[in-house]
Image (tube, coloured by chain):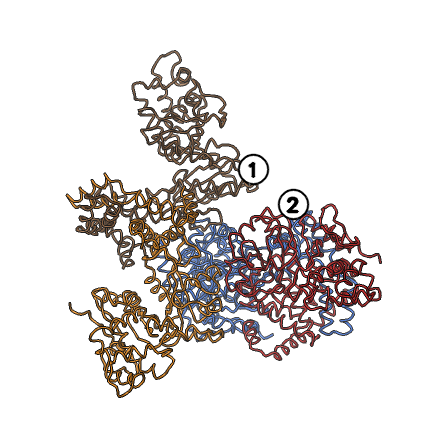
Chain colours: A red, B blue, C orange, D brown
Amino acid sequence: MARALHAAIGEFEAKDRLAFYRFLVENFLPPEAQLRAAAEAYLAEPTPEHATQVAEAAEPARQELLRRMNMVPGGTAALVAMRRDLLTNLGNEPNLKPLDVDLRHLLASWFNRGFLDLRRIDWQTPAAVLEKLIAYEAVHEIQGWDDLRRRLAPDRRCFAFFHPALPGEPLIFVEVALISGLAAAVQPLLAADGDERAERAREQAADTAIFYSISNCQAGLRGVAFGNFLIKQVVEELKAELPRLGRFSTLSPVPGLRRWLDKRLLEPDAAEVLREAEVAALRLTVGEASQPGNPVALLHRLLEMEDWWKDAMLVEAARAPLTRLCTIYLTTPQGGRGPADPVARFHLGNGARLERVNWLGNVASRGIRESYGIMVNYLYDPEQIEANHEAFVRGAIVCSAAVNALLETPALPTAMAQPKAAIRTRRPPKD
Amino acid sequence: MARALHAAIGEFEAKDRLAFYRFLVENFLPPEAQLRAAAEAYLAEPTPEHATQVAEAAEPARQELLRRMNMVPGGTAALVAMRRDLLTNLGNEPNLKPLDVDLRHLLASWFNRGFLDLRRIDWQTPAAVLEKLIAYEAVHEIQGWDDLRRRLAPDRRCFAFFHPALPGEPLIFVEVALISGLAAAVQPLLAADGDERAERAREQAADTAIFYSISNCQAGLRGVAFGNFLIKQVVEELKAELPRLGRFSTLSPVPGLRRWLDKRLLEPDAAEVLREAEVAALRLTVGEASQPGNPVALLHRLLEMEDWWKDAMLVEAARAPLTRLCTIYLTTPQGGRGPADPVARFHLGNGARLERVNWLGNVASRGIRESYGIMVNYLYDPEQIEANHEAFVRGAIVCSAAVNALLETPALPTAMAQPKAAIRTRRPPKD
Amino acid sequence: MARALHAAIGEFEAKDRLAFYRFLVENFLPPEAQLRAAAEAYLAEPTPEHATQVAEAAEPARQELLRRMNMVPGGTAALVAMRRDLLTNLGNEPNLKPLDVDLRHLLASWFNRGFLDLRRIDWQTPAAVLEKLIAYEAVHEIQGWDDLRRRLAPDRRCFAFFHPALPGEPLIFVEVALISGLAAAVQPLLAADGDERAERAREQAADTAIFYSISNCQAGLRGVAFGNFLIKQVVEELKAELPRLGRFSTLSPVPGLRRWLDKRLLEPDAAEVLREAEVAALRLTVGEASQPGNPVALLHRLLEMEDWWKDAMLVEAARAPLTRLCTIYLTTPQGGRGPADPVARFHLGNGARLERVNWLGNVASRGIRESYGIMVNYLYDPEQIEANHEAFVRGAIVCSAAVNALLETPALPTAMAQPKAAIRTRRPPKD
Amino acid sequence: MARALHAAIGEFEAKDRLAFYRFLVENFLPPEAQLRAAAEAYLAEPTPEHATQVAEAAEPARQELLRRMNMVPGGTAALVAMRRDLLTNLGNEPNLKPLDVDLRHLLASWFNRGFLDLRRIDWQTPAAVLEKLIAYEAVHEIQGWDDLRRRLAPDRRCFAFFHPALPGEPLIFVEVALISGLAAAVQPLLAADGDERAERAREQAADTAIFYSISNCQAGLRGVAFGNFLIKQVVEELKAELPRLGRFSTLSPVPGLRRWLDKRLLEPDAAEVLREAEVAALRLTVGEASQPGNPVALLHRLLEMEDWWKDAMLVEAARAPLTRLCTIYLTTPQGGRGPADPVARFHLGNGARLERVNWLGNVASRGIRESYGIMVNYLYDPEQIEANHEAFVRGAIVCSAAVNALLETPALPTAMAQPKAAIRTRRPPKD
């Protein structure tokens, strides 16, 4: 019967599917008399037994229906697809939410980390899986098979989580570059090479693994978290495979920077974010040097110039203020929830620390558009992950000494030495 | 942390484990304020949304803890072992039930049929798996490796369900014999053979697959049902592999017969269950032929004689009454829940029909002790499974014509022809 | 030591390699005294024992050296590469032949059919293998990954032989199209499609498997035959997988046709190969209708016209004479070695029969250049393969009735019905 | 046809098989005219080309026939079985030798080391392979599945070579114990244990790998050498898996000792092999102390006493003379072919050194019978293997200092310190 139901749904039009979802929400409710009795008993006396009885009575029959739909071959894939479809409709039909709650509950249970396989993806992987990487890469688009091959070269690594019930379907994957030193920009990592000997030599010499892209593949599993586990387990795998590797870091975008900055520069005290030397440099390059003018307007004018990032003088004038502003953006806690930037929140919450802010780390159009080309390294130090995570939970944002220096010194430091002992933590504002 | 927790539990003494279970039950409750609010909202207005809110609020934090314990390597195995241990303590400590409810809820979700692999077990299977078959076989004990080899010979099949998180651990397995005709007794199926040519010839000539043993392996998964799916899927596998096979039947024990009969024969109308000719035969063999005496006492006397089943005359005298009484036992519905015998209830509920009652089908001591040596065939006809199951749900017990004849004719039939058209159904009593 | 030797050879320049080959030829000879003695004993008395002694004494120590070079990981691949290199030098250095004889002897022994694995290649195959298909396809070039994907679609099949010592290295592969009816032209088979539903429907409906490309991958294994076994085993695989398939045929090039025809038309009786109606048609299209002129020159003139195959009138005028001439070319035995065309000799020698000659079956530039666009079907009828092969060994060329008709009737038949009973065989000329 | 031939041979009686072998020897000869011509050309002028021509002409058609017999599924197994059968007949029918020469030539080529897989055998291995270990173990019999399990416990290793054409058929296997210190006796290694924790602890603490049994499995591959490669590759595997292991040694039988000693003690100077103190000890235990008597007769008398090895005094009296005599036996080169003992010749030829002679290393009946219970350690030092092998080829037998001391000192040393610097080599006698 589950089989027949899946077959029918597969043939449904969009409006039939919606009708079916509504049908599931409105029926398959928990048995009212039983739930009422359990609720009343609990309200009268909130013992563990009564709580358990409420939980048992409150489970909607819908969950059992969904569990049965999962029993047939392909059932899991069909339910993931159903939730993907449901999510696109939830905005217009908020009353479908109970169905989403049930689906997410079951999917989170079924896609428990304990059931996932970490697998390395390389040129020995079936083409049917590889083409999914091309389709799902969400951070730095893969330009066809030749580009993919570069990303799977000997000095690269790619790992994905798979679930036994979705064979051949990556759930999430991460792309890693093995290099010497901390990567400051993504374009060199993506550049074609093709000299296998050189690639093998770099693999052997590498001291650093750069996680430069991490992509979720299944829209139907939104809200079921994998990324945290993936990065940590890949760090373990890489340490075991290549003991020379001593540093594990991301090279990450700052997707919310521009939006935040646009607002920040509208505030009354906007001019104060710029330092004297910075204003002078802006004046020299985009304004008349003698004119007083509005410093913020100068910065705006610079960033509106076409291809400003290709002009060395403009680049130099923008560098100091934008780098510092980005650092402020990333290290200002929002209540107890970490910084506003979602990528920063993800990595800092996982126990990484904010290691370095890279000026013009990504000059592709998306990088310029979102963050004026700035990219960031979040460093995963296996020894510190736990402590950093605890600090984050308590409201702190852990930064390297270099990052802290950026915030404090009146000018950008020329060298960015990062003595380990000097790592400091930004405490949340006292309020 | 989950890892550390598992390690600690692994070192616990029995009383530490109990203390830990109690700790889990008494803490990790659902948040009281939230659940209270949700319960009140639901009681005021039982909408789908409010029901969902109750369900969300009622989920104890314990479940999330157990889900996290599942995330580490070996976590699933440890939780299954924990529940096995918990179940042995539940009798003495019924207040641990909420923990069992949570564990069973999660395990049932994780061991959903959609996540199980059906695998054939044969002589190519790793020894580490095979030795588990020897350990777990619950119906007809496996006497070491030579006996095991016989059960995996070319004219035998064995299939098991596995779960990806418990590699090498069968969850349930079924043993099948490929033969010609319907098996009436189990000893010939278990007898050693060793002539591989003959075994291959029988495999090729077979028209019937006899499911002669089905064993659950994981005490910690009690109440999570697999057997139903296993039999049906093995039927599909066998049909695909060996198209000559036209009949799929069990050869099953009747574990509750003796217990039932002992009670039945104490009832005031006990003597009426025997027929005149049967009484005469009993009198001839165990009593003085001329004496009137109590017919039931005669039957008792026979069954108390040492090794009665080795004496042809006694066997013949017991045959008719016991076979008929067994049939009555198996075909008498208990309210709406099918017959009293658990094996009968399992197979009939799955959609099998009661095909044949085999006198002295198992003369091993357990067979004699439990059911006076009687075994039963439950037939799985792929075309009828669904209809039989529906009939069972409505309270009927589907039997072959031969079985019905046993109940109706005044004497046992000599031949047991089973014309398909004559299959009949015993309706439940009208009350 | 073998390992060190391989490493050294790997670093050799071309001239060092040649010197090494010469060294191998001039040294490592069989022991002269022993071989001399064995040869004399055999000449005196040619018994089986003496023959064996000659064979043992004549085996050069070089073979043992090569066997030891094979023992290390990667040894087989290195020897195959060595022979590929050697073969390119053999033209200039015929004295290296003894080394080639030894290498071929050993490789033929090691790559015995019994050691090869037939594997299906599809979209689940590792990319590292798939890219080799792109590189090695020798008949109809694969234009990148999208073209490859089409050739591995549900209504296509691809199989290759692999050797355990060369994992991931196909030795030879064949591409098959599953269609309805006998394919007459290759371009439709290569055309992109991309509608997976339609592809699956064609797969299920297909009655014919067309082998449209077969490519050897390893130049170092030249002279070690695989193709014969590959086709026959693929026929078996396909019959087992898709019982609807009733016809197995190639769609093959005629690589030697143009070369042969150029010579043939220079012979004194060249004009006689054309028939009256054909000459008239040629005159109408390429010459002045009233002019007498040389018929052969007319044909030449047509075939020299640019893009003649795109002009319907020219195509029609060329069709009858070229189709017939091609048939003559393919059915004229050369002494006892079958026809001159190597592809024809290969398939006819394998037991196929010449089934149909397809006018403009391949209008790619290579097809036009080699054979004026003609392609041919060789049909593998599992029931007839053995008999056809025997006939071929005795000098006959087995053709379908339609092909025979082409040779005999004064004009091309309009319909090409092929009644099975009418298959006839062209006997070799009696001389 | 090859298939049909194999089927026919499979049904042959013994005498039919012999007739078939004779038929193969007497027919399928090399072409006489061609071989004659090649032989004459070579005799006239023994160039590389002529030698190659002889080799090509001398290859009997029989080899090609055998190669074709290998092409079908199961062909290799059938040919290995054929040679096994042939070898048992060769004693009575020496004229079948040419067939054996051909089979061995082909099998040696096909079973080249480069084509073999080394696989670890453990409790995860299919039962079908494991039961072959039980069947084939030739040195220390495996007493059923429980004994086998002990040999595959965590502190044991077992490795075998497999060939792709004989899946599931080990060719040769070696059993290894991981222990601390050099094993002096085999019974402790074979003793049951069953405490998995203790086994794992020993595995982790081990500094020595003892190769205590090595068995060839395929009689049909006699004369095709694997053992040498197996030991060396297992040493590499173990070093990679367990870096703590620093010593790799056998614990080997001395199968020819008793036979040699029986002869040696018959020689006229027999009495001189015993030393004064030894004679005194023998006199004390087996003779009358005052009697002069024949010292050799005393030793004989001791060794004829029932269960002498269970009597501490007898054991002590026999220890010194037998240990020294065994050392003499193992270190006396026979011409250029190493010592007389086949096991010693094998290991010393592979580059091991004679490390220690163990008194009463094997008190099973076979050990007592063959070598008065003595076992020997041959040590494989990866750094020295090559040099030792070279020394052996030049006629030397490499021994530890302790072994040399045994030969030289007038009495047995009490402690057997083995300073590495003191390893010495016994040169062959100058003749």
Residue A91 placed where, x, y %?
A: 69, 74
Amino acid type for the residue under numbered disc 1: Ala
Query: What amino acid type is highlighted by mark number 2?
Result: Glu
Q: Vertically, is C252 above or below A156?
A: below
Residue C298 visible in the picture: yes
Residue B11: mark: 2
The chain carrying label 2 is B
Give the number of the mark in front: 2 or 1: 1
Q: Give the SS element for disc 2.
A: helix
Q: Is residue B280 visible?
A: no
Vertical placement of C90 versus C213: above or below? above
Q: Residue furthest top?
A: D290
Q: Position of residue C217 (x, y in %)?
A: 39, 60
The C terminus of chain D lies in which quarter of the figure? top left
Helix, strand or loop status at disc 1: helix
Query: Dot 1: within a 10 Å radius of its alpha carbon, few (fewer than 14), some, or many (20 or more) residues?
Result: some
- Image quadrant containing the N terminus of chain D: bottom left
Q: Residue at x 74, y 50 (%)?
A: A401
The chain ID associated with circle 1 is: D
For marks 2 and 1, give the CA distance: 23 Å
The residue pinned by badge 1 equals D205
